[in-house]
Amino acid sequence: MNQLANFVKQRRKEVNLTQEEFAEKAGVALTVIRKIEQGKTNLNVEKVNQVLAMFGHEMGPIPIQASSENGES
């Protein structure tokens, strides 16, 4: 989740938006942006994808074997 948190925070700052401004543009609650940027694990994938869509990205399922090879659990 840290990769997601870093990605969103970095990209949000690149477009010079506050968390509140970004949440409004993405169509999600401010708490969603805060949870993502804090690296929380109990996130709604649909909401995460709304946020990632702002940067032309989408999150999807990753096979367990692939995530284990990357050092993730």
Image: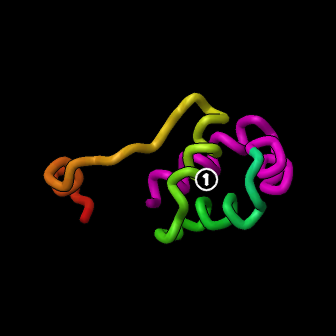
- Whether residue 70 can be seen here: no
Q: Position of residue 19 (x, y in %)?
A: 78, 55
Q: Secondary structure at mark 1?
A: helix
Q: Is residue 6 magenta?
A: yes
Q: For the C terminus, which image quadrant?
A: bottom left
Question: What is the span of residues highlighted in magenta in the rendered image?
Answer: 1-26
- Residue at the image position 63 percent from the left and 44 percent from the top: 50
Q: For the N terminus, which image quadrant?
A: bottom left
Q: Quadrant of residue 35?
A: bottom right
Q: Quadrant of residue 15?
A: top right
- Residue at the image position 46 percent from the left and 59 percent from the top: 2
Q: Is residue 38 magenta?
A: no
Q: Amino acid at mark 1?
A: Lys
Q: Position of residue 20 (x, y in %)?
A: 84, 56
For disc 1, the marked residue is: 47
- Residue at the image position 76 percent from the left and 60 percent from the top: 29
58 w.r.t. 32: above or below? above
Q: Position of residue 60 (x, y in %)?
A: 39, 44
**Residue 70 left/right relative to 19:** left
- Residue at the image position 59 percent from the left and 67 percent from the top: 38
Magenta span dominant secondary structure = helix
Q: How many labels were placed on the picture?
A: 1
